[in-house]
């Protein structure tokens, strides 16, 4: 069946990736999938808890959505699942609309994402200005860090509010319930995650570095085998090291800190139940703003992640439309199992690539690995301190933010600074929905202003009965006012004036631009004059011909 050109065919990347699939590639995918599955476990729990949900909501989202995105997606190595960017959005939706409406909103966003891909609109996401992306990403990072202060400090706050100023007020009112043990665990976790990769960064080691001297000493004293063991330890993901060591430390010393078990009662050691949330069109209309936010953010995050995967993997480029369709299917399905919104995740995708992944099989292995962990070792999760998960999320927020962009603001234009800082402050003070709406509107206004400034009308010559003008740029609705001086000249000129417009440098013309040229022609003919246009390019000529304007004027 041949689809119309404006519809995208449903062609998952895994179909082409499995052609000529070898045992060697499977071995690489298996190792990468096992590694990223272990990395995904603490992140999935942390993202869900920070979003106001149970830890199993994050885990099963990583399993179901991660498997569907790998199976149906348009990227060879992208890993899908719950993401830090959704924390603020999900928490706000749960507080304002409730958990049941979050599930409906996520499913509706899945439908929108699928339609975006099916209608070949995946490339439109690239038109979102980078200044807006940097602005809301930094804003989300700040809000994630702020939301974790409750568990980092061990504050006895029954329920954290969703907005920025209310969170600050709640923290300040309950600061007297500060727990030094939770702060110690969180800080050690955060610092450990920063130092762990640097401690074993063999590529950046110099002869005088501490790590190089340590490995040399190990080799001299214990031999090559111990050195190899040290290098093997370095490959263990930092979040797993922090989670296991600090959980064991807390359990052995019986530290008085809140854990997953004390707050949630543990994680069920069973498959999630299928359930249909109550659905009505009135509810869908009510949830339109959060639904659009989830869809837009999911599309932007997933395609940005896929582009990063293309750059670092060297594999064939992703299909943005297929990727959006897969994201849509995943987000439509996971709510029926109590999940949360999912998208492409940069940290897990990078881990997947660096672990040697060659195809979507690694993503499927990652989902299966997570499911085995839940079914076998779920009871152990009840001992995980929430302060450790807060430290992991603080590290996520630290890595998420494009902080260098703030330091280099002087290097950018005023438009870039206005867009980035405006989106940043709107994200922090209000919410991401407002930030995206205002940011995109402001970007359009600034774009129109910039394009209108590029259009010029220059008088190049004048005689007693003839005036020559040169048109430069694009004559569109934002630049029509620049024709007003020409109208003033015509209205004050003598009868029988000949006006020549050189359109050789006129790049484009819209209906508003054509309308103002029509007004100019009318003003000239009322005074017995003539309008001559020369040097028309293809697009302006086509617009004038369709409207019948060329038949009214003279052309050279």
Image (cartoon, rainbow, N blue to C red):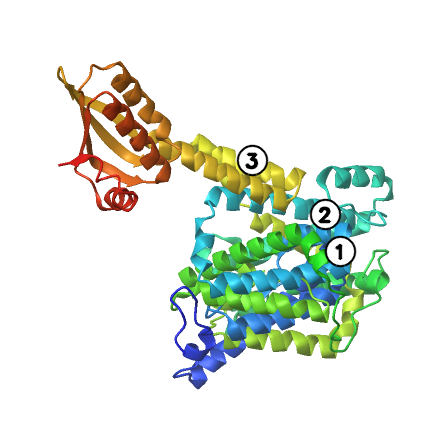
**Residue 363 occupies which quadrant of the picture?**
bottom right
Q: Say if mark 3 contacts mark 1, CB within 8 Å.
A: no
Element under disc 2: helix
**Residue corresponding to mark 2:** 147
Element under disc 1: loop
Q: Say if mark 2 contacts mark 3, CB within 8 Å.
A: no
State how far apart marks 1 and 2 are (Cα).
10 Å
Q: Residues within 10 Å of mark 1 (few under 14, many from 20)?
A: many
Mark 1 vs mark 2: which is more N-terminal? Answer: 1
State how far apart marks 3 and 1 are (Cα).
27 Å
Left or right: 320 in relation to 84: left
**Residue corresponding to mark 3:** 422
The spot of residue 256 in percent (x, y) is: 86, 56
The spot of residue 49 in percent (x, y) is: 74, 58
Question: Up-down: is 485 above or below 243?
Answer: above
Number of residue marks? 3
**Residue corresponding to mark 1:** 52
Mark 2 vs mark 3: which is more N-terminal? Answer: 2
Mark 3 vs mark 1: which is more N-terminal? Answer: 1
Query: In the image shown, does 257 or 217 lie closer to the viewer?
Result: 257
The spot of residue 90 in percent (x, y) is: 69, 54
Question: Up-down: is 168 above or below 400?
Answer: above
């Amino acid at each position: 069946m041949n689809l119309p050109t404006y519809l995208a065919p449903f062609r998952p990347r895994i179909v082409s990736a499995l052609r000529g699939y070898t045992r060697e590639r499977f071995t690489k995918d298996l190792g990468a999938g096992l590694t990223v599955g272990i990395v995904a476990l603490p992140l999935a729990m942390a993202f869900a808890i920070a979003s106001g949900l149970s830890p199993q909501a994050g885990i099963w989202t990583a399993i179901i959505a991660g498997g569907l995105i790998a199976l149906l997606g348009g990227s060879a190595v992208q890993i899908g699942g719950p993401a830090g960017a959704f924390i603020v959005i999900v928490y706000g939706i749960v507080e304002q609309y409730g958990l049941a409406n979050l599930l409906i909103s996520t499913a509706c966003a899945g439908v929108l994402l699928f339609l975006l891909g099916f209608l070949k609109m995946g490339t439109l996401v690239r038109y979102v200005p980078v200044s807006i992306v940097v602005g809301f990403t930094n804003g989300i990072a700040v809000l994630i860090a702020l939301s974790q202060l409750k568990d980092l400090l061990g504050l006895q706050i029954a329920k954290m509010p969703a907005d920025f100023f209310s969170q600050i007020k709640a923290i300040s009112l309950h600061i007297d319930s500060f727990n030094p043990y939770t702060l110690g665990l969180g800080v050690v976790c955060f610092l450990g995650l920063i130092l762990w990769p640097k401690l074993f960064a063999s590529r950046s080691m110099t002869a005088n570095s501490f790590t190089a001297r340590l490995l040399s000493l190990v080799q001299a004293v214990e031999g090559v085998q111990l050195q190899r063991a040290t290098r093997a330890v370095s490959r263990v993901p930092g979040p797993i090291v922090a989670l296991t060591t600090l959980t064991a430390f807390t359990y052995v010393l019986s530290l008085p800190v809140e854990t997953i078990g004390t707050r949630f009662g543990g994680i069920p050691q069973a498959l999630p139940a299928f359930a249909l949330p109550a659905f009505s069109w009135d509810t869908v209309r009510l949830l339109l703003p959060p639904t659009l936010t989830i869809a837009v953010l999911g599309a932007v995050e997933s395609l940005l992640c896929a582009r990063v995967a293309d750059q670092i993997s060297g594999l064939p480029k992703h299909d943005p439309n297929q990727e959006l369709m897969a994201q849509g299917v995943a987000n439509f399905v996971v709510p029926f199992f109590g999940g949360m919104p999912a998208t492409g995740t940069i940290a897990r995708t990078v881990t997947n690539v660096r672990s040697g992944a060659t195809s979507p099989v690694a993503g499927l292995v990652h989902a299966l690995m997570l499911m085995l962990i839940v079914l076998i070792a779920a009871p152990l999760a009840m001992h995980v301190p929430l302060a450790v998960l807060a430290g992991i999320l603080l590290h996520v927020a630290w890595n998420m933010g494009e902080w260098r962009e703030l330091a280099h603001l002087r290097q950018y234009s005023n438009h870039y600074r206005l867009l980035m800082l405006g989106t940043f402050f709107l994200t922090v003070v209000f919410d991401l929905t407002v930030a995206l709406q205002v940011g995109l509107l402001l970007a359009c206004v600034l774009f129109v202003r910039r394009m209108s400034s590029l259009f010029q009308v220059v008088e190049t010559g004048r005689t007693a009965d003839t005036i020559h003008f040169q048109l430069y740029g694009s004559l569109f609705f934002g630049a029509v006012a620049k024709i007003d001086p020409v109208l003033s000249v015509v209205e004050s000129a003598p009868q029988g004036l000949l006006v020549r417009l050189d359109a050789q440098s006129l790049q484009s013309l819209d209906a508003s631009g054509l309308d103002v040229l029509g007004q100019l022609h009318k003003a000239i003919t009322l005074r017995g004059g003539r309008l001559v246009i020369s040097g028309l390019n293809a697009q302006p000529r086509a617009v004038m011909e369709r409207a019948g304007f060329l038949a009214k004027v003279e052309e050279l």
